[in-house]
Image (tube, helix red, strand yellow):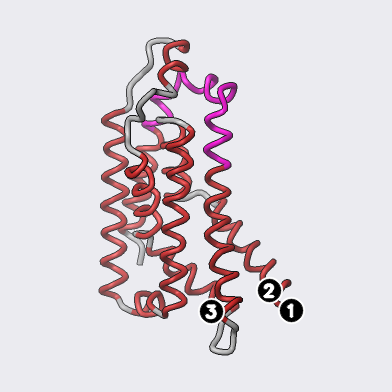
Amino acid sequence: MTFFLQWILMAAVQLAATMSPGPAFVVAVRNAMAYNRPIGILTALGLACGVAAHVIFVLAGISFLIAKSVFLFNFIKYAGAAYLFYIGVKALIFSKKKEDTQNAVQNSVPDKPLISGYKAVLNGFLTNLLNPKAVVFFTAVYTQFIDLSTPVFMHLAYGVTSVAIEFLWFAGVAIVLTNPAVKSKFMKIMHWIERGCGGLMIGLGVKLALTK
């Protein structure tokens, strides 16, 4: 199989995994809807940075060690579950009902974000970094395409592709969800959306904690 065909196949697998529902999707939707477009895009950047870390771990052989170590895998698993539980509880606590649609639309793009850009990036980064399923996924996928004889440029191409897909997909999600015409339709139920995202994050955290 030529490099181009291998790259297409790997990109397709990565895109399918990125688009599938999970902690990254919930965090991306919640931040975009609860705050504004820049915060949503910065969250996507953080998610991409988390993917970049996993790619580096795979290429350095660290992910293989984590996947084979019960202690390391469980450490990441419980840390990730605790983080998802934490941000889920925060979403539930700080969710609030808007008085009317007009005020909601005006408040949906505040002059000063309710969280900093740094926190948005950190949200995304930790969500992907502390997901042990990502460790297993990247280890399983990359070992299908990379071995000791694979040229360095192919390593880089696969890694850049994974990171780019993660960022572009979730940045696109943020842009669509923060379109005024789209967002205005959701603002009356924004408090329920945020509570739903918070509940999903808590549920995903519990599910992650029970993962073997």
Residue on which disc 2 sits: 6
Closer to the camera in the image, 188 or 106? 106
Q: What main secondary structure does the magenta stretch of the protein show?
A: helix
Residue on which disc 3 sits: 143
- The mark lying in front, picked from 1 and 3, is 1
Q: Which kind of residue does numbered mark 1 sit on?
A: Thr
Q: Which comes before the other along the chain, label 1 or label 3?
A: 1
Say what secondary structure mark 1 lies in. Answer: loop
Residue at point 63%, 63% (across, down) = 11
Q: Is residue 100 magenta?
A: no
Q: Which comes before the other along the chain, label 2 or label 3?
A: 2
- Which residues lie in the magenta part? 172-195
Whole-percent x and y of residue 104? 43, 16
Q: Are marks 2 and 3 in contact (CB under 8 Å)?
A: no
Real-space Cα separation, disc 2 to disc 1, in angstroms: 6 Å
Q: How many marks?
A: 3
Disc 1 crowd, CA 10 A, few/some/many (<14, 14-19, 20+): few
Residue on which disc 1 sits: 2
Closer to the camera in the image, 150 or 68? 150
Residue at point 53%, 79% (across, down) = 143
Whole-percent x and y of residue 192? 40, 26
Q: Are marks 1 and 3 in contact (CB under 8 Å)?
A: no
